[in-house]
Image (spheres, rainbow, N blue to C red):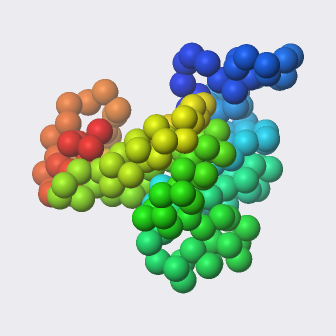
Amino acid sequence: LRLERRSGQGAGDRAGAGDRDRRPRFGPGAGGLIDTVAGSLLVFGGGYVGQRAAAEALRRGMTASATSRDAGRRAGFEAAGVTGVDPADDAALQGAVARASAILVTAPPEATGCPGLKTLIPAITASAAYPDWIGYVSSTAVYGDRDGGWAFEDDALNASSLEGARRVRAE
């Protein structure tokens, strides 16, 4: 799991940003998964991978929020220093999106599509947010059975499972 900084405007390039440090926040040369900078990560899907990403953001000096439909899980996030967000609470989600410099979607797609996309696009639009980075966690299932061989990002997609096919469609 690695956050990559997209090309284009970053937070340091916005009007009124002054002469802030313009080094990459994410990606090669930025110190790994998430660099130690002021910023906030919103994880849509607070399962295993989402919790690990949020914990890494905290470790590197960022703030972190994670979504879960389960109130008990959100309370666990709070105990770990991660702001718990109910994805069905429009106001809370819009606030988390507005504060996020990076958004990571870890929730798997459902039969009807990507729940992150369906929920985050209205929240991003309503809050007029412009995060520096938005990422999606995929799976090697999109490449199908390689019989022990390597799969590379530019290989043809050949999902052989329902979950893999849903990921292909979501991507």
Q: Position of residue 143 (x, y in %)?
A: 23, 42
| Whether residue 11 is situated above or below residue 170 in the rendered picture | above
Q: Is residue 141 left or right of residue 34?
A: left
Left or right: 162 as drawn, with respect to 27 = left
Looking at the image, which is closer to me, 52 or 14?
Answer: 14
| 79 relative to 85 in the view: left or right | right
At 57% from the left edge and 47% from the top edge, which residue is drawn?
97
Rendered residue at 23%/51% (across/down): 113
Residue in view at x 66 percent, y 45 percent = 99
Q: Is residue 55 above or below residue 164?
A: below
Say which residue appears at 49% left-offset and 42% top-offset: 126
User: Quadrant of residue 112 in the image?
Assistant: bottom left
Q: Nearer the viewer, residue 29 or 113?
A: 113
Q: Nearer the viewer, residue 152 or 43?
A: 43
Q: Quadrant of residue 26?
A: top right
The x, y position of residue 78, in whole percent, is 68, 73
- Quarter the C terminus occupies: top left
Direction right: furthest residue: 19
Q: Quadrant of residue 151?
A: top left
Q: Is residue 137 visible?
A: no
Q: Is residue 89 above or below residue 2?
A: below
